[in-house]
Image (spheres, rainbow, N blue to C red):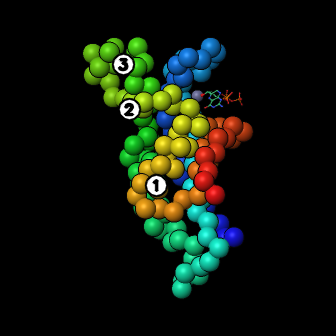
Amino acid sequence: MFRVTEEVRFCYGHRLLDYEGPCARIHGHNARVEIELSSPTLDRKGFVADFFDIEKAGKDWILAQFDHRLILREDDPVIPFLKQAGEAFVTLPVNPSAENFAKLIFDHLRGHGVPVTAVSFYETDTAVATYDER
Ligand SMILES: Nc1nc2c(c(=O)[nH]1)N=C([C@H](O)[C@H](O)COP(=O)(O)OP(=O)(O)OP(=O)(O)O)CN2
Ligand SMILES: [Zn+2]
């Protein structure tokens, strides 16, 4: 099996609901995302997929959605206060955990016809969550 991986880095703020500990407070991370495509065969160019195409479908969307954003679960009680203050934020129907980011990005890429097989979301250098369908 051949595998190619495109890496995307971005920074974001978030907090986790239903969580006891420091991650319940609004804080930030420098995330690294690895988008993996796999294939038993190569195309005529000798590619699993063109890195350029993966970047266009993955990196551009990830940066537009999440880079330098505060990402909150849609029922976060801080939201009315942020709205009142005119602060920008992004909501998700699920907690903004590394696992949920990995699945969200995977689903977006599959939904746009990218034959992704795994997305790994590094919340820190040492903490990573992966969603795959290999
Ligand atoms: N399975 C998961 N566990 C945790 C998640 C997650 O997304 N999935 N997220 C968090 C918090 O977001 C927290 O900010 C991460 O904390 P941690 O990994 O401890 O990172 P630090 O910046 O504190 O780095 P250290 O080097 O570990 O001090 C918690 N758990
Ligand atoms: Zn965190």
Counting residues from the start of the chain, the first of labels 1 and 2 encountered is 2
Q: Residue at x 54, y 37 (%)?
A: 100
- SS state under label 3: helix
Quarter of the rendering containing residue 60: bottom left
Q: Residue at x 27, y 15 (%)?
A: 84
Q: Which residue is mark 3?
A: 79
Label disc, if present, on residue 109 of the rendered structure:
1
Q: Which residue is mark 2?
A: 90
Counting residues from the start of the chain, the first of labels 3 and 2 encountered is 3
Residue 22, x across and y down, in percent: 62, 17
Q: Is mark 3 within 8 Å of ligand 2?
A: no
Task: Please give left or right for residue 66 compared with residue 128 in the image.
Answer: left
Which is more toward the observer, 130 or 10?
130
Counting residues from the start of the chain, the first of labels 1 and 3 encountered is 3
Residue 20, x across and y down, in percent: 62, 14
Image quarter where the C terminus lies is bottom right
Q: Amino acid at mark 3?
A: Ile
Q: Amino acid at mark 2?
A: Val
